[in-house]
Image (cartoon, grey):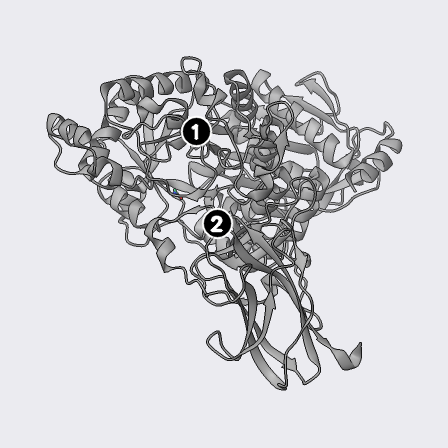
Amino acid sequence: MLATRMAKSAASIVLIGLLVGCAERVENDQASAAPEATSVPIVPAPREVARGAGTLGISKNVALTYSDVEARKTAEYFAALLKRTTGIAPTIASEGTSQTASVRFTLDRDNATPEGAYTLAITHSGVSVSASTPAGLFYGAVTLWQLFTASVQSAEIVELPLLTIDDEPRFEWRGLMIDSARHFQTIDELKQIVDAMALHKMNVLHWHLTDDQSWRLEIKKYPKLTSVGAWRVPAGAAPAADIDPATGKPRLYGGFYTQEQARELVAYAAERHITVVPEIEMPGHASAAIAAYPELAVFPETNARVPADWGIYENLFNVEESTFAFLEDVLTEAMSVFPGEYIHVGGDEAVKKQWESSPRVKARMKEFGVKNTHELQSYFIQRMEKFLNRHDRRLIGWDEILEGGLAPNATVMSWRGIEGAVAAATAGHDTVLSPWPILYFDNRPLDTANPPGRGRVISVEDVYRFDPMPAALTEDQRKHVLGVQANVWTEHIRTAERLQYMVLPRLAALAEIAWSSPERIDWESFSARLPEQYMRYEQLGLRYANPKLVVPARGAYRSSHQLALCSDKLPLALEDDAPVQGERAVFFVDIMQPCWIYKDATIGASTSLRASVGQVPFNFQIGDSRKEIPLRRPATPAGELEVRLDSCEGQPIAVIPLASAVDNQAVTQLPAAALGNHSGTHDLCFAFTQHDLDPTWVIESVELIDAGAE
Ligand code: ACM
């Protein structure tokens, strides 16, 4: 669509100058009409809009002028964006050189306004974007771009509404976290996310760079962090059988960012007024670092591999002086790449089992004067904070850093609900809200079969309705809420296209609750502005979760996501591990109870069932919860698919052997099975029998076939 639009408009560009005369008469340029703030097609909704009557016609070779070098950058960004998305090709000139200026970018540093604030005025005499900070001017340009792209305008003249917008952000931290550890994105793919963020006035990219499954940032002093730690054999039989001819071993998955590449992303983001906050995880989520340098471990194990399971590993860094020195070296290099104020040190999900069972760690605890392992984690984080503070940086960590005592200057990122934020703000600490599950964009945005993700649906409306200010806080405590952030964990997000789909359009909802004042929050208005936003995504070539993708169940065919799960403990939309190349099936499954229900199935004496099944690796570190997963005893060595009537404890009405599927790593259609002499409307329960948890058998789809109709 973009290509055709650009081609069309490029072909028709002619020099016709500014067509102020085409604008209709303004009846009330300064009309004060605050409620109109949400009626202009701008996301996030601006604070104040005074709408005039009529429009200003702008020609396709409109001239842009700027007040100084910084304003010129914004003018150039705006021109490139406009050209890319609309085909309009403005000319750029410094102020005073153009007689027919139609869009002026003015940076007025003496005019003290809040960081990020701007004024956009569209009048008879042209368009003016002004701000006292470069960020504000940039946001004004984004707003103006949205007005240009609010509808498809193929004529020579783009009609902009006459109006004045006074806008400023509600929160200073408008964040998105991308997990580059579980799956790797290229710098170009990350730039696309940064571009999308900028066009939503988001300003913090939290970059999750290290985890159990990989270490992604080059650290020159410790090259094995990336030569070893950035690579793993993916879980499952199919990747294990995918032999790399160069090594004779299974092909490795991975990648890392050189410091130069990371700096390139930082600079790209900075041009868009986005700060990159790197996350270096400690003391947990450390398996990849430990695989690279076993001496960092509590229980060093030689030849430890970078693991490929999801979930929580018990591996923690040990608490030797040499390990603290290692971490300080790592942070020193990270600080040289990331100039922003904040460094994120993780701190989440550090299971204390290894620390508790190590006599050496116990001896160190005595030396440090700490009584328990929570206090040890607090000691650990406080040491890191002192180090960062000495280098004029601030520490931020997940809300577990509250346990055992918060480091004196730490900022808390609240993910286990908003309680961490309330505790932090109450104690006088800054905080960012990014609560699970509502701001976890790895949850599926729509109830579709594809792409994979966490199974729970968190819709754009769910995100929009999240209140980013905890009601429990006093006026003073509220000042500690820096803002909100969504997190995209990528265990189940393997490609850049899927990443975009998980982010958009939920990012638009997040942006509005992060930017717009509470009086502007209005779901009806926001959802009415979404179609224009979708159109912009299409102009930008971005994938997004379009509600039109939801296809209702038809006939007697149900893919796994159209079946009910027997519980909702850990619903996942899991991708098959096979084939290694090409399209893979996605299975909706609760790995704690892999069991599906076809509700209200209409069956008769001649009904048979055709099921397609897959097998996925059980690659989840879930500790002792593993024991809670029920295993149904098989009757044959390969196991069976059982179909039970009315409930999962009901009578088995079909038992279909899996023998034909065991040697197929991808999806297998099992032989059709008769359902016996039953009729009427029944729930049908599907579950597998098997000896072992690994692999987990899964339903891909089932179909009821009426033999009479065949
Ligand atoms: C987290 O989701 N473990 C921060």
Instruction: Please tell me in which quarter of the rendered image ligand 1 is found.
Output: top left
Residue neighbourhood size for the residue with mark 2, other residues' Cα within 10 Å, grouped as few (<14), some (14–19), many (≥20): some
Q: Residue at x 12, y 36 (%)?
A: 371
In-image side of 71 versus 317 (left or right): right
Q: State whether residue 605 is above or below residue 13.
A: below
Quote the CA–CA distance across marks 1 and 2: 33 Å
Residue 460 horizontal/vertical position (percent): 55, 54
Q: State whether residue 329 is above or below residue 620.
A: above
Q: Residue at x 23, y 41 (%)?
A: 403
**Which quarter of the figure is the C terminus placed in?**
bottom right
Q: Quadrant of residue 682?
A: bottom right
Q: Secondary structure at mark 2?
A: loop
In-image side of 65 versus 231 (left or right): right
Residue 14 horizontal/vertical position (percent): 87, 29
User: What residue type is disc 1 on?
Assistant: Val
Quick check: can you spot residue 43?
A: no
User: What residue type is disc 2 on?
Assistant: Phe
Residue 285 horizontal/vertical position (percent): 37, 35
Q: Are marks 1 and 2 in contact (CB under 8 Å)?
A: no
Q: Nearer the viewer, residue 28 or 22?
A: 22
**Which quarter of the figure is the N terminus placed in?**
top right
Q: Which residue is mark 1?
A: 277
Q: Secondary structure at mark 1?
A: strand
Q: Nearer the viewer, residue 415 or 371?
A: 371
Q: Residue furthest top?
A: 221
Residue neighbourhood size for the residue with mark 1, other residues' Cα within 10 Å, grouped as few (<14), some (14–19), many (≥20): many
Q: Which residue is mark 2?
A: 618
Q: State whether residue 449 is above or below residue 23.
A: below
- For marks 1 and 2 on the same chain, the one whose residue lies earlier in the sequence: 1
Q: Nearer the viewer, residue 492 or 31?
A: 492
Residue 25 horizontal/vertical position (percent): 73, 45
